[in-house]
Image (cartoon, grey):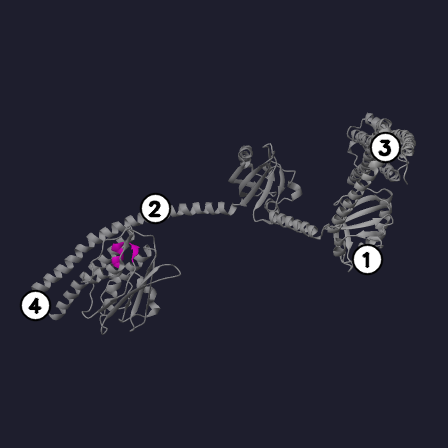
Amino acid sequence: MHLSLERKIAAAFVVGVVVLLGIGVLTWLSLTRAERAFALVEHTHVVLTRLEQIQVQVLEVQTGARGYALSGDEAFLAPFDAGVAGIRESLAAARTLTHDNPAQRARVARLAPLVEREIDVMSRRNAARRAGGIAADLGTRTLLEGKQLMDEIRAVVREMEAAENTLLAERAQAARRSAALTRGALLLAVAVALVLGAAAGARVQRDFRARRQADAALERSRKLFETFFEQSTDAIVVVDAHGVIQRVNRRTENLFSYARAELIGKPVETLMPARFRERHHAHAQGYQDAPKFRAMGAGLELFAQRQDGTEFPVDIMLSPLETDEGRVVLATIRDITERKAAAAALQRSAERIRDLYDRAPCGYHSLDPNGLVVDMNSTELAWLGYTREEIVGKKHFYDLVAPDYVGLFMRNFPLFKLAGSATNTEFQLQRKDGSTFYVSISAVALYDEQGNYVSSRSTLHDVTARRESEQRLAALHRDLQRHSDELEHANRDLEAFSYSVSHDLRAPLRHLAGFSALLAQKEGERLDAESRRLLGTIEGAAKKMGALIDALLDFSRLSRAPLQRLRVDTAALVASVIADGQIESAPDTVWQIEPLPAVAADPALLRQVWANLLGNAAKYAARATPPRVQVYSARDERTGEAVFAVQDNGVGFDPRYTEKLFKVFSRLHNDRDFRGTGIGLALVHRIVTRHGGRVWAEGRPGAGATFFFSLPDSIPAPIAPPALPVP
């Protein structure tokens, strides 16, 4: 409708008067509301004070009862009686103060019998003390009952305090709003009085412009809300005051497997498991009476149900909104299946880590700044023979250390807290049964942000077996030293014996051989054949005895001579041994020498090995046609040793007697067929063994024999002088 300027001014004046009257009424109402709000705040403070008095009075009752129980002094009953009277007065005041709050009134109704029962328990303790003296004992059950009642009283008081604190926050907020509204109304009245006239004319023009701007802003807000609503990663369900679904977003359809049309107009309980629906309906009625914002993760374990009946865990945020159609609740629903699975996996991981800690093959413990055991794994507890309850929080580590080691721990622990670590420190611990065992401890210290020691992380290994082994090893070392001394004495005796053999026995043998030869020379024509044969036998036996003595002395010297390892050209050494003429071989002997690797060995001793093996092969192959001696080598891939072989086509040997081949004076053939001392192969065995190698043989009668020996592939050694080549 189009109005003239006068009408607009008149209308504006009327409106201004009405507005001023309205502001006055509003100001009065705001003052009244503020006064009422501040009264409610004061009422809440009074309730909280009464709750605090109840707790203090209950503690006074307990203090009086305990003081009387410990001392028997009737003076302690005065605060007991005063506390009982005060408690009952405070409970009566609490009932009066909470008469308008059903929930708090119900909590007072729960609190009163608990307090009376606590008073009854304390009264019975006093009566028992009065009747039985300080030795009176009501038993663990009564003590536990008193503690349980006190815990329940504290729990109820905390509930009431939490409720009152919530009311206090709400009422304080309301009081502030009322005060702000009052101030705003007063300021508005002044402002309206000043600008009403000027605003009347401008208002008409601005109305249209503001309306258009408001409509545009509303449209933008609507589009923004629609975008947020539909593209939210959480399901959003709008529910009216009757619990009926008014609207859902696209994520709701995907999450619950419903079409949008299937949910609109249905009760919100459709999205819940059947077992929760009835209870939720009752809770929803209470929520509608006092709606408030509830954030996700509010400590409730909630479940939703898809159309196919499957359930899944959810978090739900509730946001009450006022609309033109009335109040609605915006429920934001988030599927937390993966989060719950991750939490369960984390829990399982923590349990596995704890299991590894407890079942580790070594001991673990932690000590606080005073050396008190604050944690210990099952392995260490089993070693000590204690239960966790007997040690953790009750025993210091020095209580577990053997008496002889307590001083060591008391000296080292302060140093460890400063240094921050300790490695392989050995202690003797004492089990519960009094027996002891040795451990090696390594530890690190943990510090707070200020650098103060907090606790240790200590690892223990039982080294009792190692200590016992060390003791046995020390005993063995002493025995070895004793045997070494005895061997040294034996070697000196052997040297003396060798000297005696070398000097005292050789001269008589030379006399026998020389005089036999002289006698044969002077009297040979007058002696008959038998006498000449006997003289020859004497001379031969003396020479053989001399050869045996020389061989035995060589064998003895070999046991004492130090090894001088050099890098030896084996092929050149073998060629030199064959070429120097010391080997007795048939003129037609065929030598087949294959390429041989260099080795690290004592050149002189290795030459003796080859001389004995090559001479042995040539001797036993001499009757073959033609005699053949083959030398070759190979590498043992398993051990990395160089293996050498000397093979002949001679008479061979019976493999049943292989072990006798390398023993001193042990021969498989008689001296008439093959001359020898029985020392050569024993020398080979001794030399190769001293080099860390092995010797063995293979053969059959009439089919030849092969002698093997191996030498380790040691580090490179200095090169030995070259041997003479075969001419």
Q: CA distance from mark 3 to mark 2?
A: 130 Å
Instruction: Report the mark closest to the observer, 1 or 2.
Output: 1
* Residue at image location 37% in from the left, 46% down from the top: 482
**Would you name the residue on which mark 4 appears?**
526
Give residue 201's mark: 3
Give residue 491's mark: none
Mark 4 vs 3, N-terminal side: 3
Q: Is residue 432 above or below residue 246?
A: above
- The image quarter containing residue 40 is top right
Give residue 261's mark: 1
> Callout 3 environment at 10 Å: few (<14), some (14 to 19), or many (20+)?
some
> Callout 4 environment at 10 Å: few (<14), some (14 to 19), or many (20+)?
few
The image shows residue 581 at horizontal and vertical percentages of 18, 62
Mark 3: secondary structure:
helix
> Callout 1 environment at 10 Å: few (<14), some (14 to 19), or many (20+)?
few
**Would you name the residue on which mark 2 appears?**
485
Amino acid of disc 3: Gly
The image shows residue 196 at horizontal and vertical percentages of 86, 29
Mark 1 vs 3, N-terminal side: 3
Front in this rendered view, residue 354 or 605: 354
* Residue at image location 7% in from the left, 63% down from the top: 522
CB within 8 Å, label 1 to label 4: no
Mark 4 vs 2, N-terminal side: 2
Q: Does residue 56 show up magenta in the picture?
A: no
Mark 1: secondary structure:
helix
Amino acid of disc 4: Arg
Residue 566, can we see it? yes
Range drawn in magenta: 598-608
Mark 4: secondary structure:
loop
Instruction: Report the mark closest to the observer, 4 or 3.
Output: 3
- The image quarter containing residue 144 is top right
